[in-house]
Image (cartoon, rainbow, N blue to C red):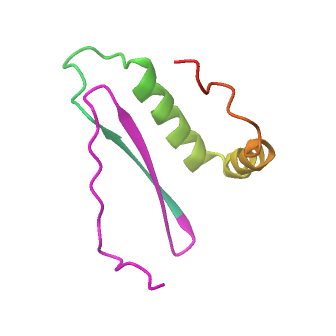
């Protein structure tokens, strides 16, 4: 399987109330972007929970080298757990 061209992009449509954390890696360095589906309210100063959590995760990933490993350790420990939320919608 061939690797995609480095300049290839993929579009993701976000709802106005959604925020995405985009994590990349190039030459061994991590890059982090936060993308919002809508504009923040002008002059509000406060963020709602979703963007605030995404920004906190982004900052922690960039500033705390051990956090990356902690997240992966947690993921590997729980990836075989049954989905507890399944069917509860």
Q: Main secondary structure of the magenta part?
A: loop
Q: Is residue 44 above or below residue 55?
A: above
Q: Image point 22% across, 19% down: which residue? A: 41
User: Does residue 50 appear left or right of residue 7 in this picture?
Assistant: right
Could you say where residue 85 lies in the image, as x and y percent from the top left? 63, 24
Q: Image point 59% across, 40% down: which residue? A: 60
Q: Is residue 10 above or below residue 12?
A: below
Could you say where residue 48 lies in the image, as x and y percent from the top left? 39, 18
Residue interval drawn in magenta: 1-29
User: Does residue 32 appear left or right of residue 41 in this picture?
Assistant: right
43 or 41, nearer to the observer: 41
- Where, by quadrant of the figure, is residue 20 drawn? top left
Instruction: Give the total of numbered labels.
Output: 0
45 or 54, nearer to the observer: 54
User: Does residue 77 appear left or right of residue 15 in this picture?
Assistant: right
67 or 11, nearer to the observer: 11
- Where, by quadrant of the figure, is residue 39 drawn? top left
């Amino acid at each position: 399987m061939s690797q995609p061209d480095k300049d290839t992009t993929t579009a993701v449509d976000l709802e106005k109330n959604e925020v995405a954390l985009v994590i990349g890696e190039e030459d061994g360095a991590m890059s982090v972007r936060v993308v919002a589906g809508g504009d923040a309210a002008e002059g509000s100063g406060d963020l709602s929970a979703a963007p605030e959590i995404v920004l906190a995760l982004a900052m922690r990933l960039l500033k705390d080298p051990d956090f990356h490993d902690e997240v992966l350790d947690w993921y590997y420990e729980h990836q075989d757990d049954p989905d507890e939320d399944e069917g509860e919608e």
